[in-house]
Amino acid sequence: MRDDLRSLPDSWYPCFHVHVCILYMIPKAITAELIRNSPDVFRDLSLYLSEHRSRITGQPPADFPAGLKQLCAVVQLDTGINTSGLWGYLSDVTNDDGSISEIGEAIGVLAEIGATEIVSILDEALELWRDFLAVSRPDPTPGQKLSYDDFHRIRRLRESLDHQMDPLDNEYFHARSKLANVVANYVRNRPNEFIHPAHA
């Protein structure tokens, strides 16, 4: 191992991603010292959550403290929007019956920690998305394909939704720049809800 990696603090370990020349430092534990001294608590908690949550369900381990479990919903939402934008994220979490999973819990947590600007943006995006779903689902008989007219009508609706979502995407990424400070303040006011493992 490289000498400079041997000198890293015990609470961290390197994660190498093939084809990407970036060294991500993922905390081995969430300690009171890390919460107190980290220059980016949200980043560190996000990396820790991404490393430990189930690869199948996306859920955190059962022994996670309440704060980490709540933050997992925010990290999943933020990762999804960063990857696909609001339109893509909402499409991914919308069930076949039109119900929308996951996002409700994340919005609740964001409201609790004081990220009101992001909550407002998500509420507006959700309203646009639900309006789109209401007029774009022709509800065909099972096994029946969309008609030519329905296909092109839905495509036009999607294009219109894209134009409406673009400004909200920009607003989200602008508001997201403040999220790290909001999360850090919240976590530092209640560190015991985030320390893991319990003996860390």
Image (cartoon, rainbow, N blue to C red):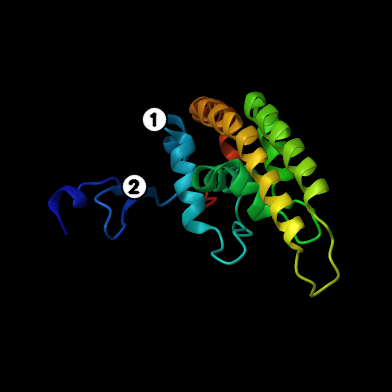
Amino acid type, label 1: Pro
Where's residue 123, x and y in %?
73, 33
Q: Separation of disc 2 and disc 1 at Cα?
A: 13 Å
Query: Could you say which quadrant of the image residue 163 lies in?
Result: top right
> Which residue occupies the foreground of this view, 198 or 171?
171
86 on left or right of 19: right
The crowding category of the residue bearing disc 1, from other C-alpha atoms within 10 Å (few below 14, some 14 to 19, many at least 20), is few
Q: Give coordinates of residue 175: x percent, y percent.
A: 55, 26
Q: Residue at x 32, y 53 (%)?
A: 13
Secondary structure type for disc 1: loop
- Observer-nearest residue: 174 or 54? 174
Snapshot quadrant of residue 144: bottom right
- Number of residues whose C-alpha sits closer than 10 Å to that of mark 2, classed few (under 14), some (14–19) or many (20 or more): some
Question: Tag 2's secondary structure?
Answer: strand
Q: Residue furthest bottom?
A: 143
Residue at figure coordinates x 65%, y 33% from the top left: 164
Q: To which quarter of the image does residue 137 belong?
A: bottom right
Point out which mark residue 25 bears: 2
Q: Amino acid at mark 2?
A: Met
Quadrant in which the N terminus is drawn: bottom left
